[in-house]
Image (spheres, grey):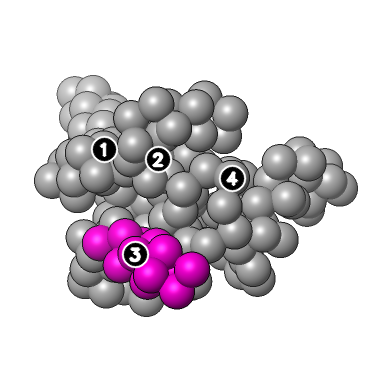
Amino acid sequence: MTRLLARSALGLLLALSAAGAAGALRADLVKWRARTEGEAEAKKSGKPVLYFFTADWCAPCHLMKEEVFADRKVASGIDRRYIPVALEDRRRETGKNSPGMDDLAKRFGVEGFPTLVVARPGTGKGVRLTGWVGRTKTVAFLERAAERLFEAEKADTARR
């Protein structure tokens, strides 16, 4: 009887532990696209692209995914305002990145991860947020970036 109780307790403890771990890591809810697909969709829809420069080894990138992109309301806002495109740095794992990743990182001056850039496909101009600055500031950036991009584009047009 004691053995049965011990096994039951151990099983319950393992189940609770697994459930706790699963709950601690919230899933990213944003509908990320590949670069080519996302840029084509952005051109067709007129929405700007939200480029998410990330890396698997980047702890702040995982924080951003769990604290920002796993929030249903934030993910819905991203999908409403932008065409989200994830670009993963693979240099540490494979020794190189896809040409598209390196080209875009250079174009937008990406120097660290995570970096968010809101831009129109094919342009070098964008609105950027570099690094993990916390949930509140990241969400504020996401809420205003499209408007800031539009203002910058309008100013560029007026200068011509």
The residue at which mark 4 appears reads as 122
Q: Position of residue 66 (x, y in %)?
A: 32, 52
**Residue 25 is a magenta residue:** no
Q: Provide residue 25's location: percent of width, then percent of height.
A: 33, 46
At 21% from the left and 33% from the top, the residue drawn is 12
Residue at 74% in and 51% down: 102
Query: Is residue 152 visible to us here?
Result: no
Q: Position of residue 69 (x, y in %)?
A: 30, 48
- Secondary structure beneath label 4: loop
110 relative position to 84: left or right: right
Measure the C-alpha gap from mark 3 to mark 4.
17 Å
Secondary structure beneath label 3: helix
Q: Earlier in the sequence, mark 1 or mark 2?
A: 1
Viewer-side residue, 97 vs 158: 158
Q: Are marks 3 and 2 in contact (CB under 8 Å)?
A: no
Magenta stretch bounds: 147-160
Q: Earlier in the sequence, mark 1 or mark 4?
A: 1
Amino acid type for the residue under numbered disc 1: Asp
Marks 3, 4: nearer the viewer: 3
Residue at image mark 3: 154
